Image: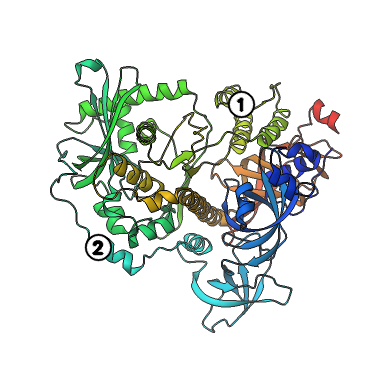
Amino acid sequence: MKHVKHKDALSMTGIIRHLNRQKTSDTSRLRPTDKFINRRFHKNVLTVTAEITGMDAMGDLLARPMDAEEAKHIPQITLIADHVKPPVGIGDIVRLRVHALKNNQYEGEALKRISAQQNKLVGVFENGFFTPTDRRLKRTFKLAKAPDTLKNGDLVMADIPSSYDFDTNAVFVQKLGNLSDSFAPTLIALNNHNLSETFPESVLKEARRFTVPATADKTHPDKTHIPFVTIDGSDARDFDDAVFAEQDPDPQNKNGWHVMVAIADVAYYVRPGSALDKEAYRRGNSVYFPDRVVPMLPFELSAGVCSLNPNEKRYALICDLKLDKNGDKISHTFKRALICSKHRLTYDRVQAMLNRELPPPPGLEAELAALESVYHLLARRRRERGVLNIDVPERQITLTATGHVARIALREQTDSMKLIEELMILANVAAAEILEEKKAPVMYRVHDRPSLEKIETFNHFLQTLPIPIKAFRQASDPVAFNALLNRFDNRAERFAVNESVLRTQSQACYTPDNIGHFGLALTRYAHFTSPIRRYADVMVHRALIRALHLGIGGLTQDEEAIFTDIGEHISHTERQAASAERDAADRYVSLFMQDKIGAVFEAIVASVTEFGLFVRTNDSFADGFVPLRALTDDFYDFDVEHLTLIGRNGGCCYRLGDRVQVILREASPLTGGLIFSIKHPNRKHPSKQHKKKR
């Protein structure tokens, strides 16, 4: 039996990585050709000064060495332990103890904060004390300089020293609202992640100058006769893309298809070096909360002159494609144009049309039939390509007008959504291909194959499954993962495998260095289709404009020189946005569950750690924690080889995917945390394999 002893591990992945580091010999983890690593690391450990730059998909912080030589050889460090109080955050400069792993992977432990990006934390005021919303900071502070007007429950921002002891006070900075206010979860997320809803006046001044184009010009010929349509969610707040399809009239392409994907021409308005451009770069992307959007561009652009609103003329950059009868792309071109979307359609409405429950709008019958035919061809090509088929559920939180949670559900992936997704992928690939053809800079969207370390951890998980599974030697393509997923019909087992496959994946990012997109099984891929909400797409538009001589607003030499830095920055802002969205959603769910203390829920075990179980309820899709202390029927040991908690006396065990009944014990809207206990012990005995291990 192997036991995890690392008390400061920040996640299950951190625990597993720590154990893998212990059981792997020092020399096997170093690349013998890496002279820098061999010279600088002593027993695979090096202490460096680094900046916390972002967060990965599992919630672990990422860091980059400040020293240029070190950064050249250690591009990224995953933080697995934090010995600093208060916990380090994005933007902090810290001393890290770095461990070199195999496959050019590095992990770090935060030893000391050198400087902080900001020591301001959001928390709630209660009887003169300040309790931070950060669930990692499990203590309260006496609040100094608090105004007499503060009331219990007020949300405040306070300054906390980088290092503190028992007597340290938090210092009042400003009042933000009250924990009972409508939309408080979003307010907390905005301030915790340093996101701003307002734009500088210089940016707004530029945005207000622009007017909707009324006529075509030399670089934007008139294409308003083409019946483009937008297809988005009913709650969509901006419209980046419009689509059109028809049977190709070219006799040389018999039974082929002509497809056009029109994208808002943001680069025409947001020029390099302008105030608008600098602010869009700083934000990196729009951030979407249940109650609002924090846009990358001001409303005047994001919902105005750039948004492809129905029956309004707009400048667009069009990807014009031809597909043969089998759905293979035979040509693509890019051009600017003046267009006019004819209809604003929703996913629900289009799905009803695909189901033959609603007729298409008059005049669009042929086009929607063509779009449906093209979708089926592209979907078949997707299956043949072997796209990674992981189920990544998206939680949809519906609020009332007063900010209360009305409904929590999983967003269903319908054919109408997949139709648009496939058309966007088609255009994104074409953008990357044509830029490569022109030998122009490309801001690729890349997704690396899983690391050997993650494959090793995944193979340990495979040993826990009820049927024999051949170990993965490597992940050369997603087909093997799909084949594994398809072997399980049982909901709990499929959930367990799906979660493990998901955790095995690398995180996608932006870079000018192409390594392909593993998940989509594509050798080249870029983001072209959402320039209103992603700065990466603006970069691709500018590169296309310059490479194809499409007029003003093209990529500058200065931008090309720092393409790598731009990619790193927008990858960071994307992670920051995802973290803020997740934090707000967790707090809304906690609010929703607050009046359900003592209720029993059907749930599934989503993760197993030394400290307890993470569970996900079946009806409200709420994620919560069952601490080890709540498993009172026995003493439990953590088997890290099989990611299982096993009772010493009764033989009960808990593993990923187990169905359990849980009782809600605590719900904290302040931190977004939910604490559960188990209603009945899981009377499933460990397998023979487990017993042998013990």
In the picture of the structure, the residue carrying the numbered disc 2 is 208
- Label located before the other in sequence (1 or 2): 2
Mark 1 neighbour density, 10 Å: few (under 14) some (14–19) many (20 or more): few
Viewed as shown, does residue 652 lie left or right of 475?
Answer: right
Residue appearing at x 41%, y 22% in the figure: 381
Q: Which is more toward the observer, 547 or 325?
A: 547
Q: Residue at x 35, y 59 (%)?
A: 273
Q: Is residue 692 above or below residue 276?
A: above
State the image quarter where residue 606 is shown: top right
Task: Give the residue type at disc 2.
Answer: Arg
**Residue at disc 2, secondary structure:** helix
Instruction: Compare residues 356 and 551 and report the one nearer the observer.
Output: 551
Q: Nearer the viewer, mark 1 or mark 2?
A: 2
- Asked whether, in this view, residue 131 is left or right of residue 405, the answer is right
The tally of labels here is 2
Outermost residue toward the left in this view: 215
Q: Is residue 292 left or right of residue 634?
A: left
Determine whether 136 is above or below 477 in the image: below
- Residue receiving disc 1: 490
- Is 191 drawn above or below residue 539 in the view shown? below
Residue type, mark 1 in image: Asn
- Which element carries disc 1, helix, strand or loop? loop
Q: Is residue 353 above or below residue 527?
A: above
- Residue at 70% x, 72% y is 164
Q: Position of residue 33 (x, y in %)?
A: 69, 38
User: Looking at the image, can residue 530 be seen?
Assistant: yes
In the rendered image, the quadrant that contains the N terminus is: top right
Residue 668: quadrant of the picture: bottom right
Marks 1/2 in contact by CB < 8 Å: the verdict is no
Disc 1 from disc 2: Cα separation:
56 Å
